[in-house]
Amino acid sequence: MTESTLFDVLRQALWISVVISAPMLAVALVAGVAIGLFQALTSVQEMTLTFVPKVGAMMVVFWVSMSFMTTTLVAFFQDRLIPLIAGG
């Protein structure tokens, strides 16, 4: 394996990790901003109010997008990593 092949596979792996994590990070951002706005408007400063809904929303998005994540990872492994390991 050459150095350029290694860097190319690493670049693709990092991009796939960004694509896979984007839905959960976007939901965490939107939920955090909405909860922060709610707390600022109502002056309710409860720590669990920020944590529990954000984690719940992220779990729902993870459950919904789990098939997309699995399909993307399996395709990456089958198309790029397994042929490299097999020597092709």
Image (cartoon, rainbow, N blue to C red):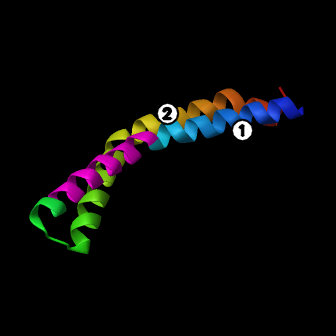
Q: CA distance from mark 2 to mark 1?
A: 19 Å
Left or right of 16 in this view: 55:
left
Residue 6 as seen in the image, left or right of residue 62: right
x and y percentages locating residue 57 in the rendered image: 27, 52
Q: On the picture, is 77 further left or further right than 31?
A: right
* Quarter residue 85 falls in: top right
Measured as percent of width and height from the top left, residue 20 is found at 48, 40
What residue is drawn where x is 21% and y is 57%? 35
Q: Marks 2 and 1: which is nearer the front?
A: 1
Instruction: Name the residue located 58 percent from the left edge and 30 percent from the top edge.
Output: 75
Q: Nearer the viewer, residue 70 or 40?
A: 40
Which type of secondary structure does the marked residue at label 2 adopt? helix
* For residue 21, above or below residue 4: below
Type of residue at label 2?
Thr
Report the span colored magenta: 22-38
Residue 87 forms part of the magenta stretch: no
Residue type at the position of mark 1: Leu
Residue located farthest toward the right when viewing the structure as drawn = 2
Q: Nearer the viewer, residue 8 or 71?
A: 8
Q: Dot 2, how many residues are within 10 Å of its Cα: few (below 14), some (14-19), or many (20+)?
A: few
Q: Which mark is residue 39?
A: none
State the residue position of label 2. Answer: 71
Q: Position of residue 22 (x, y in %)?
A: 44, 40
Residue depicted at 57% across the width and 36% down the height: 16
The secondary structure type at the circle numbered 1 is: helix
For the C terminus, which image quadrant?
top right
- According to the image, label 1 marks what residue? 10
Residue 1 in view of the camera? no
Q: Is residue 16 left or right of residue 30?
A: right
Q: Earlier in the sequence, mark 2 or mark 1?
A: 1
Q: Main secondary structure of the magenta part?
A: helix
